[in-house]
Image (cartoon, rainbow, N blue to C red):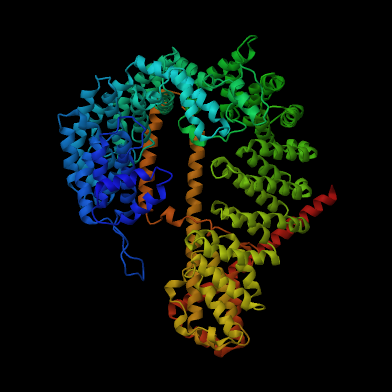
C-alpha cells in the first residue's frame, strides 16, 4: 500500500469530518500483509520530525498508536474457536520479523510521545517471543548500550527496562533468561551511572533515573543473589548513597517554588470537579502568567534531582524492608539480611538523617523523598544497630514528624476552597488560618483517596511515631511531655494544638493499653478536647471530633464525661454549619455508640433526627464514610429504624435514581462509588426489617424499581448489588413479583454475556430459588424444573449441578414424562460426583435418599439402583474431606492470630534485649518455614473457601436436617420394609464400601446423641434463666 495513503488516512483519524472514513479505510487494509511494518516505518520516518516535548499530534504519533493496538491484539498466535474452520487474524510472521528488526532503533530515534507507544509494543513482543523466537534482542540492546554515542543510551535503557518489567513478578525459577541477560547488562549499568553522576544535565538525569528504575524492577519481587551478591550490592549502595547525599540543585528549588503555586491553582480549579476537563487549558495560561512554563510542570518530580533521590531512598527502604531486616525475611535471605544490617544500615541511616536535617532547616525535600526516609527510619527502630544511631537523633525526628502531623501547613487555606464550595451551594468557614477543608484527614465533599496513604509523608510520620512509641519505652514519655507542653501553653499557634491532638489520637491504641496513661485519657479529653468544640476555628472542632473517634473505646469512669462526649458529637452533627465538622462528628458518634453501651442508650431517643441529618449530608457531600456510618447506625438501632425504614429507603432510592440520571455520572468515579454505597445501605435496611413482613412488602416495590432501572440501563457494575437486594427480598419467602424477576434475569444473562454471570448467579440468590424449588418440586415440577435448567445453563454450572439435574429428570419420569427419563448411561461417573460445596453434597445425599424411598418407584430409579448407594458413599467421603479442610484452615488461622497478638504486645526495653530477640525471631522464622515445608501438601489458597462455598443455607444450621441421620433412617427403613429393594441397592457394594456404610451408621448415632445433648443443655439453660427471673 502507498505510504502516503497510509499517512493521509492516519491524519484523517483526528479530523472530525474525516474520522469515520479514515478509520474504515485503516480497518479494511489492516489485515494486509506488510501493512503493520508500514506503520512502523511511518513511525520511524516521521519520528524525527516531531520536536522533542511537542504535544502536536503528528502522523508518527497516530501511527505508533495504531501499531501498538495491532501488536497488542494480534501479535500472539490465536487458534480458531471450537467448531470454526477459519483462523482468526494474526500478524504475519514476515511482518513480525520486520518489526523485531526495527523496533529497538525506532525507540532510540523517536521523540517521547512516539517512544511511549513503541515501548509498549516492545513489551508485548518480548513477552511472547523472548527467548524462543527473538534471542537477538539482548545483543541489539547491548550493542547500543556499549556504543560511544550517548544519544542511543536512553532509548536502549528504555528497551532494557521493558525486558526487566516482563520478568518483574515472575518466580525465581522462571527468571533464568533475564538473569542470563543481566549478567551482561548489570555491570554496564553500574559503569554508566557512575560515569553520569557528575553530570547534572537534563539528559544525564533522565538516564540515571532509568538505570535506577531498571535496578528496582530487577529486585522488587525477588532478589537474585546469584546476580546481586554482597560485592555488587556494596557498589550499588554506594551509588544510592551518593545520589541521596547530594544537595538539591538551585534550579529544582526555583521550579519547586513556582510549581507550588501551580499545584494550588490545580487543586482549586479541580476541587470537587467544579470545572470540566477543557478548563485545564485555562490553568496552563494562568500558570504561564505567574512565570511557570507548561514544560516545567513536573520537572522536580519526573526530570530533576528529586526523582533520583526518591528512587535511591526507595531502594534503601525497599531492600531493608524486604531483604535486609533480620527476623522478618524468608530463609533464603537470612544471610543477606545479616550482612545488610552490619554493612549498610548505619551508613544509610546517617545519610537519611542528613535529609531530615535539611527538611528541618526549611530546605526543599520532595514529599516522596521525605516519606521514604521516614519509612526507612520506621524499620530502623526495631534493630539495635540502627537504634543506637537513631536514639540520639530522636529530637530531630520528633520535630520533623510533628511538622507532618501539624495541621498540614502545606495545604491551601480554607478561604480559597470556600469560594469554590460556595459556587456549589456549600457553606464553609472562610478563616484564613484554617487548614484545607477544615479537617485533618477527611474532606467533606471529596472522597478520601486510600492510595494516597502509601505515598503520604504524614502517614509515614504517623507510622514512625507509632512504631517508636510501641517498640521503645523511652519514646512515648518524651512525646507525651512534648504534646502536654503545647496543650497547656497559654499562647500557642492553633495549628500546634491541632498537631498535638493529631499525635495523641494517632497513639490512642498504645495509650489505652498502657496503665500509666489509660486512666489519664478521660481527664485529657475533659480538659483539652471538650473546650475545643466551642472554638471559632472549624478545623479544631473537626479535630476534636476526630480525637473522640480515636479514643472511642476508652473506659469512662465518669458517666457525665461520656454523656458530654456524645452530646457534643451529636450537637456538632446536627447544628454545626461546616460540612467537614459534620462528617467527623458523624463518624465519632457512630464509634462511641459502637464501643459504649451507655452512649447507645443515650442516643436512642434522637435516632430519627440523626438519621435524617445523615441522609441530608450524604446527599450534599456524597462521602463514602457517611454511607458506612448510616449502615452501622442502622444495625445498632434496628428497632428504631424499622418504623422509618420505608421513608429512609424511599429517600435513598431517590438519591440513587438522581445519581444514575445525572449527566456527569459516567465521567465521575465518585458517583459510582456513592451509588454502590446506597445500594449496600438499602440491603442493610432489608436485613433489619426481615422480621417485619408488612414493612418488607412495602420495601419490595421500591427495591424492584431500583433493580429495574439498573437492568434497563444495562449498568453491569451494579448487577452484584441488585442481586444482593433480590436475595434479601427472597431469603424467607418469594413473592410472585420476585418470580417474575427471575425470568427477567434469564433475559439479562442472554443479553449481557454468560461468562460474566457465572460468578454472579452462583451466589446466594440462586441458592434461595433452588432451595424453594426443591421444596416444591413434587407439587409444581414442570415450571420450576424448566427455570432451574435454564438458570443452570446460563450460569455454566452444568457439571456441579449435574446431580440436581438427575433428580429433576427422575422426577419428570415420575410425573409420567418418559421422554425425560434418563438411562443408566446418563448417570454420572463417580469422578463427577465431587461437587464444589458442602451444601451441594448435603443436598445430593438428601435428594438421592428421597429417591430411594419413593413409594411408587419409576422405572428410571430402578434402572440405576446399583449406582445410588455407591454415589452416596462417595458424597460422604467428600463431606469428610471438606470438613477436614475447614478444620485445618481454622487451626492455622488461630495459630497465626495468636502469633500476631503476641507480636502486637512486643516492647523492646534495651538494645541488648533487641539483639537477642532478633536471633530468636530468625530461629522461629526458620522453624516455621520448615513446618510449612513439612505441611506442603496443604495449599491454603486452594483450600480457602470462595464466597459461594462459604454461603450458608437453612440446611447448614445446627438444628437443620442431618444428612447422616436422614440417609441412615431411610436405608434402615427400606431394609425393614422392602428386602428385595434393599438387596438391589446394597448388593453391588464392595467390602470396603460395606465397611464405609457401617461407619456411616456409627457416625449417625454419634451425631444423634450429640444433637440430643445440645438440646438438653439448651433446655436447662432456658429453665435456669426462667428461675433466675422469677427470683428477681
Q: Is residue 485 above or below residue 230?
A: above
How many callouts does the rendering have?
0
Image coordinates for residue 784, horizontal then vertical, percent: 62, 74
The image quadrant that residue 744 belongs to is bottom right
Q: Is residue 72 left or right of residue 465?
A: left
| Residue 603 seen | yes
Q: Position of residue 571 (x, y in %)?
A: 75, 29
67 vs 606, nearest the viewer: 67
Q: Is residue 124 above or below residue 902?
A: below
Instruction: Please tell me which residue lies in front, 732 or 470.
Output: 732
Q: Residue at x 47, y 61 (%)?
A: 755
Q: Is residue 790 above or below residue 283?
A: below
Residue at the spot x=63%, y=11% of the render? 489
Q: Residue at x 41, y 55 (%)?
A: 939
Q: Position of residue 887 (x, y in %)?
A: 50, 56
Looking at the picture, how far across and down is residue 847, in whole percent? Answer: 58, 75
Would you say 732 lies left or right of 18 here? right
Amino acid at each position: 500500500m502507498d505510504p502516503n495513503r497510509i499517512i493521509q488516512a492516519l491524519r484523517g483519524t483526528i479530523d472530525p469530518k474525516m474520522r469515520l472514513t479514515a478509520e474504515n479505510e485503516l480497518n479494511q487494509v489492516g489485515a494486509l500483509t506488510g501493512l503493520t511494518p508500514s506503520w512502523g516505518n511511518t513511525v520511524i520516518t516521521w519520528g524525527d520530525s516531531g520536536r522533542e516535548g511537542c504535544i502536536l499530534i503528528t502522523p508518527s504519533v497516530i501511527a505508533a498508536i495504531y501499531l501498538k493496538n495491532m501488536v497488542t491484539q494480534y501479535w500472539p498466535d490465536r487458534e480458531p474457536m471450537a467448531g470454526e474452520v477459519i483462523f482468526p487474524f494474526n500478524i504475519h510472521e514476515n511482518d513480525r520479523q520486520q518489526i523485531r528488526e526495527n523496533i529497538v532503533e525506532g525507540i532510540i530515534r523517536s521523540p517521547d510521545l512516539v517512544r511511549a507507544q513503541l515501548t509498549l509494543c516492545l513489551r508485548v513482543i518480548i513477552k511472547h517471543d523472548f527467548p524462543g523466537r527473538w534471542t537477538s534482542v539482548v545483543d541489539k540492546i547491548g550493542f547500543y548500550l556499549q556504543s560511544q554515542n550517548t544519544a542511543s543510551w536512553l532509548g536502549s535503557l528504555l528497551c532494557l527496562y521493558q525486558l526487566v518489567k516482563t520478568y518483574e513478578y515472575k518466580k525465581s525459577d522462571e527468571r533464568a533468561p533475564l538473569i542470563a541477560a543481566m549478567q551482561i547488562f548489570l555491570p554496564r549499568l553500574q559503569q554508566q551511572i557512575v560515569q553520569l553522576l557528575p553530570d547534572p544535565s537534563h539528559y544525564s538525569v533522565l538516564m540515571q533515573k532509568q538505570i535506577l528504575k531498571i535496578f528496582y524492577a530487577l529486585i522488587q519481587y525477588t532478589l537474585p543473589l546469584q546476580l546481586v551478591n554482597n560485592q555488587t550490592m556494596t557498589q550499588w549502595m554506594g551509588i544510592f548513597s551518593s545520589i541521596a547525599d547530594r544537595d538539591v540543585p538551585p534550579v529544582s528549588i526555583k521550579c519547586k517554588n513556582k510549581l507550588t503555586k501551580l499545584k494550588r491553582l490545580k487543586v482549586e480549579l479541580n476541587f470537587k470537579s467544579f470545572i470540566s476537563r477543557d478548563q485545564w487549558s485555562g490553568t496552563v495560561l494562568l500558570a504561564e502568567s505567574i512565570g511557570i512554563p507548561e514544560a516545567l510542570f513536573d520537572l522536580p518530580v519526573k526530570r530533576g534531582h528529586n526523582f533520583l533521590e526518591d528512587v535511591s531512598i526507595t531502594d534503601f527502604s525497599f531492600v531493608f524492608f524486604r531483604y535486609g531486616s533480620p527476623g522478618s525475611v524468608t530463609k533464603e535471605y537470612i544471610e543477606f539480611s545479616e550482612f545488610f544490617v552490619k554493612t549498610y544500615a548505619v551508613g544509610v541511616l546517617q545519610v537519611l538523617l542528613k535529609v531530615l536535617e535539611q527538611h528541618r532547616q526549611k530546605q526543599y525535600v520532595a514529599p516522596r523523598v521525605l516519606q521514604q526516609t521516614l519509612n526507612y527510619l520506621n524499620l530502623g527502630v526495631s534493630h539495635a544497630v540502627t537504634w543506637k544511631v537513631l536514639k540520639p537523633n530522636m529530637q530531630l525526628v520528633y520535630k520533623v514528624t510533628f511538622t507532618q502531623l501539624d495541621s498540614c501547613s502545606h495545604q491551601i487555606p480554607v478561604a480559597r476552597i470556600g469560594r469554590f464550595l460556595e459556587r456549589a451551594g456549600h457553606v464553609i468557614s472562610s478563616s484564613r488560618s484554617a487548614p484545607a477543608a477544615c479537617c485533618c484527614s477527611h474532606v467533606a465533599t471529596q472522597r478520601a483517596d486510600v492510595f494516597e496513604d502509601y505515598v503520604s509523608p504524614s502517614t509515614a510520620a504517623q507510622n514512625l511515631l507509632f512504631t517508636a512509641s510501641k517498640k521503645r519505652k523511652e519514646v512515648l514519655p518524651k512525646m507525651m511531655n512534648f504534646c502536654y507542653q503545647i496543650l497547656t501553653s497559654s499562647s500557642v499557634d492553633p495549628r500546634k494544638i491541632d498537631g498535638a491532638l493529631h499525635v495523641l489520637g494517632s497513639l490512642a491504641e498504645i495509650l489505652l493499653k498502657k496503665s500509666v496513661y489509660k486512666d489519664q485519657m478521660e481527664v485529657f479529653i475533659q480538659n483539652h478536647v471538650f473546650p475545643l468544640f466551642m472554638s471559632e476555628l472549624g478545623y479544631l472542632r473537626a479535630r476534636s471530633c476526630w480525637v473522640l473517634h480515636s479514643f472511642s473505646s476508652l473506659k469512662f469512669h465518669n458517666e457525665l464525661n461520656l454523656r458530654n462526649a456524645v452530646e457534643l458529637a451529636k450537637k456538632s452533627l446536627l447544628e454545626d454549619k461546616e460540612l467537614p465538622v459534620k462528617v467527623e462528628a458523624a463518624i465519632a458518634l457512630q464509634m462511641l455508640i459502637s464501643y459504649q453501651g451507655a452512649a447507645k442508650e443515650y442516643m436512642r431517643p434522637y435516632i430519627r433526627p440523626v438519621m435524617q441529618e445523615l441522609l441530608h449530608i450524604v446527599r450534599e457531600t456524597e462521602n463514602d464514610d457517611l454511607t458506612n456510618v448510616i449502615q452501622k447506625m442502622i444495625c445498632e438501632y434496628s428497632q428504631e429504624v424499622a418504623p422509618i425504614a420505608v421513608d429512609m429507603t424511599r429517600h435513598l432510592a431517590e438519591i440513587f435514581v438522581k445519581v444514575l440520571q445525572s449527566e456527569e455520572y459516567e465521567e465521575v468515579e465518585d458517583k459510582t462509588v456513592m451509588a454502590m454505597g446506597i445500594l449496600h445501605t438499602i440491603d442493610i435496611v432489608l436485613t433489619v426489617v426481615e422480621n417485619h413482613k408488612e414493612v418488607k412488602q412495602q420495601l419490595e416495590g421500591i427495591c424492584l424499581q431500583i433493580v429495574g432501572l439498573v437492568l434497563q440501563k444495562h449498568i453491569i457494575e451494579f448487577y452484584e448489588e441488585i442481586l444482593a437486594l433480590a436475595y434479601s427480598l427472597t431469603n424467607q419467602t418469594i413473592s410472585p413479583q420476585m418470580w417474575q424477576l427471575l425470568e427477567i434475569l434469564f433475559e439479562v444473562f442472554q443479553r449481557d454475556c454468560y461468562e460474566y454471570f457465572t460468578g454472579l448467579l452462583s451466589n446466594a440468590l440462586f441458592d434461595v430459588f433452588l432451595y424453594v424449588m426443591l421444596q416444591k418440586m413434587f407439587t409444581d415440577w414442570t415450571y420450576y424444573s424448566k427455570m432451574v435448567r435454564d438458570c443452570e445453563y446460563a450460569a455454566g454450572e452444568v457439571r456441579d449441578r449435574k446431580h440436581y439435574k438427575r433428580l429433576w429428570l427422575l422426577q419428570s419420569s415420575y410425573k409420567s414424562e418418559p421422554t425425560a427419563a434418563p438411562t443408566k448411561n446418563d448417570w454420572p461417573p463417580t469422578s463427577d460426583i465431587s461437587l464444589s460445596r458442602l451444601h451441594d453434597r448435603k443436598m445430593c445425599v438428601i435428594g438421592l435418599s428421597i429417591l430411594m424411598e419413593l413409594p411408587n418407584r419409576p422405572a428410571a430409579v430402578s434402572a440405576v439402583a446399583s449406582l445410588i448407594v455407591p454415589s452416596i458413599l462417595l458424597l460422604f467421603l467428600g463431606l469428610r474431606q471438606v470438613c477436614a479442610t475447614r478444620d485445618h484452615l481454622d487451626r492455622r488461622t488461630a495459630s497465626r492470630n495468636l502469633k500476631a497478638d503476641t507480636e502486637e504486645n512486643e516492647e523492646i526495653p534495651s538494645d541488648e534485649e533487641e539483639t537477642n530477640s532478633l536471633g530468636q525471631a530468625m530461629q522461629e522464622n526458620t522453624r516455621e518455614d520448615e513446618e510449612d515445608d513439612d505441611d506442603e501438601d496443604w495449599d491454603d489458597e486452594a483450600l480457602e473457601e470462595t464466597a459461594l462455598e462459604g454461603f450458608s443455607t437453612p440446611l447448614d444450621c445446627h438444628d437443620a436436617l442431618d444428612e447422616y441421620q436422614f440417609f441412615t433412617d431411610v436405608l434402615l427403613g427400606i431394609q425393614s420394609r422392602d428386602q428385595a429393594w434393599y438387596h438391589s441397592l446394597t448388593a453391588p457394594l464392595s467390602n470396603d464400601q460395606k465397611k464405609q456404610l457401617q461407619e456411616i451408621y456409627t457416625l449417625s448415632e454419634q451425631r444423634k446423641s450429640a444433637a440430643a445433648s445440645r438440646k438438653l443443655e439448651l433446655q436447662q439453660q432456658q429453665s435456669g434463666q426462667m428461675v433466675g427471673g422469677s427470683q428477681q
